[in-house]
Image: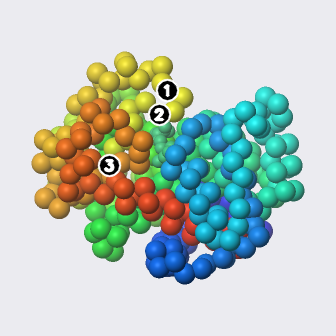
């Protein structure tokens, strides 16, 4: 039966660790230019309702490095739900391609793709979740800090798709997740409740950014207004300003704390130049790891 990756929780803990191992192996092969055509002759259809740099390029380059091919289908080509229903797009594409990656607004579109396409479907970001990003982030944290062991991971900013995927990962890998968000910008209540009920990790939602940053092993942030929320961007700046990762906030974390940002960054807003360009920032390693983790996910689902 085909498998999908619509959310981190589609994989078991063992599968996630296996994906990390495969990603490391493929990273070594990529860097030493060893051929690894594990998806020779296979095609990935990539549907984008929103803009992208990292996701689009890393999936496309990843498929090429795996001996396959990727097809970019932007908003004007497909007209999801306008020119044709999502179900019909999924049914048709599945006759041509071996896998589908989609970046969409409503998460229900990803769920529909998985339901109606007979090929694996990968979530390349929805309003609710960004699972590929957070698996790549965890790979980066392990590379820099060693084997996963109950780290304090602090996220400061909006309770968005990035945070919701961190909450999902915390159901599988033990961590102390501290979410510093302004009141009214909390993450998805249902996902939070499920993760707390499962009880693998301690999850705190705090409205005090300094308390959230205290003793963090990892500090993480993201844009204050996600794609689709551009009209709110100016109004959000005042609300989110205290949650910016500045040198002052970083000084509250552990001395060896590393800083992550999924990018694109709005320098001077959610993160200062001094922090993102400073010695504790691993954001470009993090961006690179999107390539390696997604190749491992593609191989797991499409080989
Ligand atoms: N982090 C991330 O998904 O970047 P893009 O929006 O550029 O794909
Ligand atoms: N929360 C951001 C993530 C971008 C990679 C957005 O959805 O726009």
Q: Which mark is residue 226?
A: 2
Asked whether residue 220 appears in the rendered view, the answer is: yes
Q: Check if mark 1's residue and mark 2's residue have beta carbons within 8 Å.
A: yes
Disc 1 versus disc 3: distance between alpha carbons?
20 Å
- Of the 4 image quadrants, the one containing the C terminus is bottom right
Q: Is mark 2 within 8 Å of ligand 2?
A: yes
Give the total of numbered labels: 3
Residues 149 and 203: in front is 149
Quarter of the image where one finds residue 75: top right
The spot of residue 226 in percent (x, y) is 47, 33
Residue situated furthest front in the rendering: 33
Asked if residue 148 lies left or right of residue 97, the reply is left
Question: Nearer the N terminus, badge 1 or badge 3?
Answer: 3
Classify mark 3: helix, strand or loop. strand
* Identity of the residue drawn at 64% across and 64% down: 63
Classify mark 1: helix, strand or loop. loop
């Amino acid at each position: 039966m085909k498998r999908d990756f619509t959310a981190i929780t589609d994989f078991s803990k063992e599968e996630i660790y296996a994906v990390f191992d495969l990603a490391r192996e493929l990273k070594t092969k990529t860097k030493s230019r060893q051929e690894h055509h594990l998806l020779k002759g296979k095609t990935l259809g990539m549907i984008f309702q929103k803009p992208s740099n990292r996701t689009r390029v890393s999936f496309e380059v990843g498929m090429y490095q795996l001996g396959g091919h990727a097809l970019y289908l932007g908003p004007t080509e497909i007209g999801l739900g306008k020119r044709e229903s999502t179900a019909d797009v999924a049914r048709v594409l599945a006759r041509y391609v071996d896998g589908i990656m989609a970046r969409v607004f409503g998460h229900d579109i990803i769920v529909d793709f998985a339901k109606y396409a007979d090929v694996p479907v990968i979530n390349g970001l929805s309003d609710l979740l960004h699972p590929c990003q957070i698996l790549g982030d965890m790979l980066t944290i392990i590379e820099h800090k060693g084997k996963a062991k109950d780290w304090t991971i602090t996220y400061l900013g909006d309770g968005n798709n990035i945070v919701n995927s961190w909450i999902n990962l915390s159901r599988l890998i033990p961590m102390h997740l501290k979410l510093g968000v302004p009141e009214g910008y909390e993450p998805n209540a249902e996902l939070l409740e499920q993760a707390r009920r499962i009880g693998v990790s301690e999850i705190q939602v705090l409205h005090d950014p300094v308390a959230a940053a205290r003793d963090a092993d990892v500090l993480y942030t993201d844009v204050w207004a996600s794609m689709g929320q551009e009209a709110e961007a100016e109004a959000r700046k005042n609300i989110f300003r205290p949650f910016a990762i500045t040198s002052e906030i970083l000084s509250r974390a552990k001395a060896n704390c590393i800083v992550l940002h999924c990018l694109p960054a709005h320098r001077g807003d959610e993160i200062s130049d001094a922090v993102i360009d400073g010695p504790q920032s691993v954001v470009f390693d993090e961006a690179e790891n999107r390539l390696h983790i997604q190749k491992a996910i593609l191989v797991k689902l499409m080989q």
